[in-house]
Amino acid sequence: YDVARHGIIQVSGDDHYGRKLIVFSSCCLPPSHQLNHHRLLEYLKFTLDQYVEMDYILVYFHYGLRSSNKPSLKWLREAYSEFDRKYKKNLKALYVVHPTNFIRIVWNIFKPLISHKFGRKLTYVNYLAELQDHLNYEQFFIPPDVLRHDEELRAAQKGGPPPSVKTPPPRPPLPTQQFGVSLHYIREKNREAIIPPVIAQTVTYLKDKGEASSQFRSNKLPVSFEQIGDVHVPAVILKTFLRELPEPLLTFRVYNQVQELLYVESSLRVSRCKQIMESLPEHNFIVAKYLLCFLHQVSQESIINKMSPSNLACVFGVNLVWPRHGSISLSALTPINIFTEILIEHFHTVFGSRRPPAQVMP
């Protein structure tokens, strides 16, 4: 009863094929100190046990998840591991309603642990109207808070917030803020650190993880798994930090130069990449050198970790440079990946020596 009374998990009608709908509503989660999340997991399994022998559908309403009621990533991992094949086999679809960047980041973190077959069952639903194509909408219980949030989203899509909602002025960034602020701002607030703390700490962690792996290869046992942790979390954090910079680490100015790399002869591309990097502002160059040095070190272990310069370029290239306006087209990915691969593979040549700042600034 201590879990059921909140209405977090409900069985709510059927879909168009008669499959039972099970709904999880984040807005019904009380503050974490008021709910035993282990008991929440047991209650979810208890509910599913009544239907898992038949085909069923899960609907997850994400709106209402806050820092005060959000389960930990460790709990999410435990929850996924608790659901063995009997739960996953007959799950036909998982609808995530009103997804946010947090959901997409979490999904990327767990992707290596999730089977491809299970991953194909996930569908993001941006507006409630999209659910009508899949579910018997009139039988479907939707929390009032979710309905209100959906109305606000649709009103904003049509050209602005509802008349009753005043858009507050943008808040100034906090002194400790790291994500979504410029490199200059981070350096101003962290005068002791040339390298942004997020980059420095994630790289240090990933290096330590690599050292732990090398202990296995050199038979230096035992290795503490408690200290190793999950390597995917800091990797995703690092990519997210880079992507949320207001201006890419390599600046908007070099985007066109990178695109023109395809027209440079192969034998001259390394020197051209060196010129492009030397044209960066001093601080951007220093941070980029620190990051690319780490990626070069990772690539040196590609036989073991499968992260060759090419693979690393595909992962990090789009997070280092992008256009000022619009998104990156598929055709634009090729020169970005070639450029990043050269920076990683020929790190010592590209970053070996740099002319004095006065000569390299535009």
Image (tube, rainbow, N blue to C red):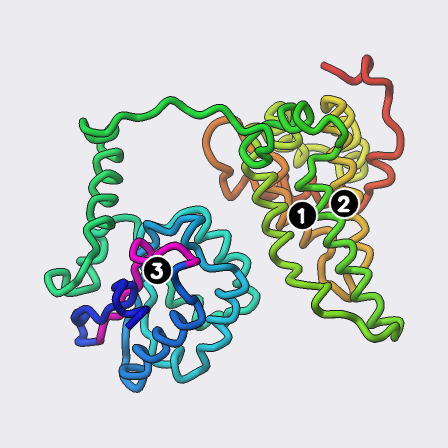
For the magenta stretch, what is the residue range? 20-33
Residue under label 3: 123
Q: Amino acid at mark 3?
A: Thr
- Circle 2 — which element? helix
Lower sequence index among marks 3 and 1? 3
- Between 111 and 41, the one lying in front of the other is 41
State the image coordinates of residue 302 (x, y, percent, origin top left).
77, 60
Residue under label 2: 344
Residue 238 seen in render: yes
Q: Is residue 103 above or below residue 246?
A: below
Q: Is residue 302 above or below residue 282?
A: below
Q: Residue at x 51, y 38 (%)?
A: 328
Is residue 4 covered in magenta? no
Q: Amino acid at mark 1?
A: Ala
Give the distance between the C-alpha atoms of the residues marked 3 and 1, in whole angstroms.
28 Å
Lower sequence index among marks 2 and 1? 1
State the image coordinates of residue 274 (x, y, percent, origin top left).
79, 31
Q: Is residue 137 above or below residue 352?
A: below
Give the distance between the C-alpha atoms of the residues marked 2 and 3, in whole angstroms.
35 Å
Judge the density around disc 2: few (<14), some (14-19), many (≥20) Cα neighbours within 10 Å: many
Lower sequence index among marks 2 and 3? 3
Is residue 300 left or right of 86 when viewed as pictured? right
- Circle 3 — which element? strand
- Between 162 and 68, the one lying in front of the other is 68
- Between 117 and 331, the one lying in front of the other is 117
Q: Is residue 38 above or below residue 323?
A: below
Residue under label 1: 313
State the image coordinates of residue 284 (x, y, percent, origin top left).
71, 28
- Between 99 and 34, the one lying in front of the other is 34
Q: Residue at x 60, y 43 (%)?
A: 334
Q: Residue at x 46, y 81 (%)?
A: 84
